[in-house]
Structures are given as structure tokens and as C-alpha cells.
Image: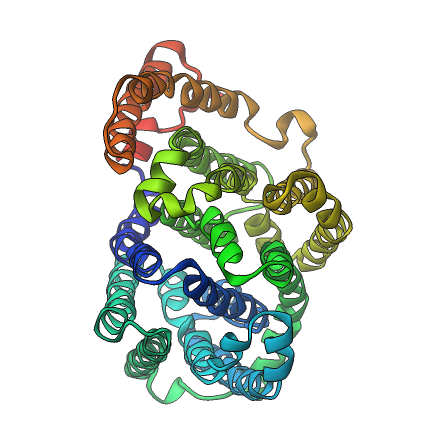
Amino acid sequence: MDNSSRPALQIVAGRSVGLAASFAIGIVLARLFDPAVFGIYKQFFLVYATLYGVLQLGMAESLYYFVPKAPDRIGRLVCNAMTTLFAVGLGSTAALYLARPMMAGWLNAELAGHVLPLGLFLTFMLTGTVLEIVMVSRKRHMAAAVTYALSDILRTTLFIAPALLFASLSAVFIGAAVFAGLRLAAAVIALWRECGREFRFDPALWRRQLAYALPFALAVGIEVVLINYHQYVVAARFDSATFAIYAVGCLQIPLYDLIVTSTVNVLMVRMADAPRGRAALALWHDTVCRIAFLIFPLAVLLVAGAHDLIVGLFTATYAASVPIFIVWVLTMLPAVMAVDAVLRVYAQTRFLLVMNLVRFVCVAALIGGFLAAFGLTGAVLVTLIALTVTKGLGVVRVASLMGVGFRDALPWRRLAGITSIALVAVLPVRWLQLSVAWPPIVTFAAGAAVYVATYAGLAWTGAQVLGIFEDAGQKAHVSSAVT
């Protein structure tokens, strides 16, 4: 395993342990509550996810930029970020409480009754988000991996246990707030022990952080709204039971999140230290191929096994979620280009803002027509189209920054090879699905095993015999990615 793979894989390993546990939360609650109640739970976390992304103001993510450049001031950098996030969280809690009537009219009256645990959960999670970022920025990848795992395991426990004991959404939300409070307390203790008296607010440094972060925060804020906008449209137009169907179709895949997030975080830290020009281009291309090597086959497998997976996990009650899920899976593919990470390293936060404004205009203008033409699937289809267009603009911008043309903008040959192998490897899975009559989740698990074995074998053959992973005389390190 080479040095560039090890940090990302350590974080992926740590997050996979926790995410495997936390993924069970939605499955348990979908089976415990009826769709109307489960829809309220999904709306609670839709509001949380939107506010969590918007209200970070770029302060937490700015640590990826500042910590490697000023390790002697890490305590003040972190304290500035945490103080800002805590204040913003408290302000949002007050705003949520005052906005209860509007929330009841727009989304759901019962959801409006849970704004206090929502506000506390949001505040504590916002403030504590800096801990893992600091660890990754200081290249303490194993510590970050362990923290991710333990945090997600505790979250799963404090979500599921109240649901099983009390069969109440209120108990689930209180458990969520307790978890977030414990997580924040652990983060403060760990950072104080590391930084000591340097863990203090620095107004001058805070202004520099904010000047860097705000353009990025605007871009991220628009992106967060865009990511969730289609769900708000569905939540506002349909009842909570229908929203539950749609939300299950927009199922978050833990493997996708941990692969992409962990890999691009490492990319940003490494690219900040790398010289500009061809060295940065090679680093970007290598990261793109590593992500594609895992995300392309994951997407193909999920599309092929969509029915077995959704019905197997959530029961036949959610069979209508399958076509929505198929389109949703395809939205993973544009993230392979990792353009946002590169633009942030190059401090191109204003261009990120432009990208997201274009995307917002596309979604807002088209979603009504797509819903009318394609039903619930249309809401996620328009999201896929807008995302693809804007990521393409990002590729053009990154290529310009690195002084290359369209031909060298991406490692096209390697990406084509990975795509071909991912598609061919699904043929034995389709044969299996047509040949057996097993329970859906068993069929999916067996198909996944067959697919992984077939894909790994074809990838090894492509690398060793056909050379399709070679680009400019360098191999894509297939064996490292598989490990």
C-alpha cells in the first residue's frame, strides 16, 4: 500500500465501522413506525441536515486550509470556529422555536412540536464537528478513524434504544440531543488537553478565518439547499407517508459517503503541500481514479440490486421507492471528479458560489415540470441533471487553473476502463437474480459477493494484462485500492 492510500483507507476503515452501525437506525425505525410517523422522523433530519450544512459558515471546513499553514495557532483557530458555531447554533434554536407556526403550515404540525430537541441536537453537532477535522488536518488519521467509529456507534445506541424502549419519536429525538451533547463534551475535553491555554478566542485571527470562509460558506449553503431542495418540494406537496416513500428512495449509502469524504479530505491536505502545476494535476487524477475505482462499481451494483435492497431492508411497503432510488444512485457519479476539493485548495470559493447558483437556477426552474412529467422520480432526476452540469463546469475551471486542455482535464482512459469493467461485472449478478427465488436481502447479499469477486478479477486482469489502468506510464495501483 502506498503512502497516498494509507491515510484515506484508515479513515474509511474507521468510518465504516461506525456507519455500518448508524445505517441500522433508519432500517429499525422504518420497521418500528408506520410510514406516516417515519416520514416525520425523516423530515426532522431533513431540516437538521439543511441547517447543519448552511450554518457552519465555512468555519469548520476552513480548518483544512488554516491548520496545515499555522500549526502553532491551532488552539485559537479551533476555538474561533467552535465559538462561532455554538453562537450560530443557539441563534438557530431560538429561530426554530419562533418559526413553529410556519413549520407546521409548510411541513408538518407534529414536526413543529420537536423544535427544541432539534435545536439542541443541531447546536451540539455544529460545535463538535471540528474534532475530526483537526485530526485529519494534523495528519492523525488513525485517531480520526477511531473517533468516527466510536461516535457513530454511540449515536446508533442512543437513537435505537429509546425507540425500542418507548416506541416514541420524542424519545428518539431526546436521545439524539443527549448523544450530541456527549460528543461535544468529549471534543472540548480532547482539544483543551491538546491545546491548553492556546485554546482561546483570537479576534484578529477570527476575522481572517471568516474572510476566507464566508464566500465558501455561501457556496456550501446554496449547495446544501440544492441537495435537499427536492425533498422540501415533495414534503410540502405530499403527506408524510408519501414523503417517507420518497425519502427511502433517497437513501444515503454509507459506503459512498465514507469513500468520497475521506478521500477528498486527504486530497485537500496533500494538495495544500504539493507544488502547483503537473504535480497537482497528477495528484488530482490519481484521486479521481481511486474514487472511481470504488464508486463506479458501487453504483452499478446498487442499480442492479435496487429492488432486492430496498424491499429487503424496508419491506414491501416501500417498493415504490425503488425507481427513485435508481436515479438517486446515479447522483453519486459526478462526485468522482472531486472538483470542489481542488477549487477549495486553490481558494476558488467564489467560483464554487457561481457553480451552485447555476445549479440552483436549474433545479428551481425545472423541478415543477419534472414532477408533473415523471412523478416522484422527476424530483430526483432534475437534481441529477443539474449536478452533472455544474460538476462539468468545475472540471473546466480546474483544468484552466492547472493549465491543461479538455484532453488532459481528466484521466479519460482510466475512467473508461473502470466503467467498462464495472458494467461487465454485473452480468453474473443478473444471471443470479433471474435464477433464484431467495428472500430479497439474501439475493442482494449473494449478488454483491458475486459482483465484488467478478469486479476484482476483471480489474486485476485489466491492470496486469490489458494495461487499461495505465496512464502516462503510471498504474492506478489497483491492488492498493482493493485493499
Name the one closer to the observer, 412 or 202: 412
Name the one closer to the observer, 290 or 311: 311
Q: What residue lies at 40% left-to-right and 51% top-to-bottom?
A: 262
Location of residue 432 in the rendering, given as x and y in whole percent from the top left corner: 29, 19
Task: Name the side, left or right, on which 149 lies relative to 349.
Answer: left
Can residue 333 be seen in this snapshot? yes
Image quarter of the C terminus: top left
Task: Name the side, left or right, on which 138 lies relative to 363.
Answer: left
Task: Name the side, left or right, on which 406 lies relative to 447.
Answer: right
Location of residue 402 in the rendering, given as x and y in whole percent from the top left corner: 65, 40
Image quarter of the N terminus: top left
Location of residue 219 in the rendering, given as x and y in whole percent from the top left corner: 66, 61
Instruction: Specify the quadrant of the image occupied by residue 146.
Output: bottom left
Q: Is residue 133 above or below residue 436?
A: below
Location of residue 277 in the rendering, given as x and y in whole percent from the top left corner: 60, 40
Q: Is residue 409 above or below residue 165?
A: above
Q: What residue lies at 51% left-to-right and 37% top-to-bottom?
A: 323
Q: What residue lies at 48% left-to-right and 51% top-to-bottom?
A: 245
